[in-house]
């Protein structure tokens, strides 16, 4: 289950990343609560989500070009330092009672710009840390780190907001970046520079997109990611409304709701890590996508806190299982020289489409309410995944 952690440099990187992710989730929950507390607006929650993600849509493809051209360790040191600075800035403004919704939006936008270069690099660097032998296990354990932090971070945030305030949560996130920065300082990454074709950045980008266009399976996988991002994931930004107005559980309940989704996702990561490089990944991807859609619909209709926790655990489990399988299939198919660009397209569709989903969800919820918005999202995902499954039978054969 933990075979990739036997590789020393990946083990150092993994633990540093994990501690940083806990801090990031603490800030995410505290920031959402702060926005809703300041504005009492589900629409503005959607706007903040939009601004934090729109740079991924505009810049992440070039982030992939940079990842294929520049030493990935240096890129990550720069991006993690930038994240740390923005966390401390948010903490200081909040502590001084100077924070406004506009400032939060601006900081969210800056975080999104940094993320558009950080995310493709983090996806592409895994194979250089562990090699292809441990790639599937490492991707699964990355999911474990992300989603165990999704349990710990929101649960801590629910407690910390009450005890040390939202500024304290932001300070903790800032400090947590030291963990990943120290890890990056301790390791060396064997960057494999791609053959120099003297292309411009535009030429490199065009070359990567042409590679995707000529591979039908990659196109199908990217399409599934795009649908999930646009319609499936925006439920997250509406969680404060569910917690406060529908389930009446407050900020501590919000933390438990977010943690429940993280718990399900953690189970998915551990199961995938234990399975190893198994066959029939395409079939499991189809099953996971459909169960994810059903779980969204169940959550939208729930008014019981316990059943909502259960539904979110299913959402977290099967969404992560689907994304991890897609990530693995993509990295198995792609050649090393295209890896940064292909993973940037993965992040472009996953995080780049999310701002439009967030904005759409925030807008619809103002008219139809958050419950109907999430129900609509689940139905759209279900219908889309069924159409893809019927139209592209080769997906079932992917392994």
Image: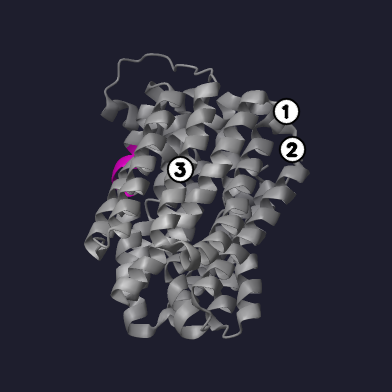
Tell me whether circle 2 and circle 1 mark residues in contact (CB < 8 Å). Answer: yes
Q: Earlier in the sequence, mark 1 or mark 3?
A: 1
- Magenta residue check for 182: no
Magenta stretch in the rendered image: 57-61
Q: CA distance from mark 1 to mark 3?
A: 27 Å
Category of crowding for the residue at label 1, using alpha-carbon neighbours closer than 10 angstroms: few (below 14), some (14–19), many (at least 20): few
Disc 2 marks which residue? Answer: 2
Q: Note whether residue 220 is visible.
A: no
Mark 1: which secondary structure?
helix
Disc 1 marks which residue? Answer: 6
Residue drawn where x is 50% and y is 49% of the image: 23
The label nearer to you, 3 versus 2, is 3
397 displayed left or right of 243 = right
Q: Main secondary structure of the magenta part?
A: helix
Q: Looking at this view, is 10 or 224 the one in front?
A: 10
Residue drawn where x is 47% and y is 45% of the image: 219
């Amino acid at each position: 289950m933990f075979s990739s952690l036997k590789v020393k440099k990946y083990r150092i990187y993994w633990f540093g990343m994990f501690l940083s992710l806990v801090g990031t989730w603490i800030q995410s929950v505290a920031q959402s609560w702060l926005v809703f507390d300041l504005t009492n607006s589900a629409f503005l929650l959607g706007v903040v989500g939009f601004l934090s993600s729109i740079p991924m849509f505009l810049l992440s493809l070039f982030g992939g070009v940079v990842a294929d051209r520049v030493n990935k360790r240096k890129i990550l040191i720069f991006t993690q330092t930038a994240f740390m600075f923005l966390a401390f800035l948010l903490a200081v403004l909040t502590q001084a009672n100077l924070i406004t919704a506009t400032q939060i939006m601006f900081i969210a936008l800056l975080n999104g710009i940094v993320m558009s270069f950080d995310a493709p690099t983090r996806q592409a660097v895994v194979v250089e840390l562990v090699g292809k032998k441990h790639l599937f296990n490492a991707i699964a354990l990355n999911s474990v780190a992300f989603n165990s932090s999704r349990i710990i971070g929101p649960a801590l945030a629910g407690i910390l907001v009450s005890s040390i305030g939202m500024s304290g949560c932001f300070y903790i996130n800032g400090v947590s970046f030291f963990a990943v920065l120290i890890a990056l300082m301790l390791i060396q990454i064997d960057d494999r520079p791609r053959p120099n074709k003297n292309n411009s950045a535009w030429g490199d980008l065009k070359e990567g997109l042409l590679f995707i266009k000529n591979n039908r399976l990659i196109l199908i996988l990217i399409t599934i990611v795009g649908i999930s991002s646009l319609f499936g994931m925006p439920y997250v930004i509406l969680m404060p409304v569910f917690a406060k107005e529908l389930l009446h559980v407050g900020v501590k309940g919000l933390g438990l709701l977010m943690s429940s989704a993280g718990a399900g996702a953690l189970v998915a990561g551990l199961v995938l890590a234990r399975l190893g490089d198994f066959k029939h990944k395409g079939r499991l991807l189809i099953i996971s996508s459909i169960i994810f859609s059903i779980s969204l619909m169940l959550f939208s209709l729930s008014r019981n806190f316990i059943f909502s926790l259960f539904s979110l655990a299913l959402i977290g489990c099967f969404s992560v299982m689907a994304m991890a399988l897609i990530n693995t299939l993509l990295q198995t198919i792609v050649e090393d020289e295209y890896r940064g660009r292909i993973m940037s397209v993965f992040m472009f569709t996953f995080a780049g489409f999310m701002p439009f989903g967030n904005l759409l969800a925030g807008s619809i919820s103002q008219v139809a309410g958050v419950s109907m918005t999430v129900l609509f999202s689940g139905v759209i995902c279900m219908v889309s995944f069924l159409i893809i499954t019927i139209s592209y039978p080769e997906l079932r054969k992917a392994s």
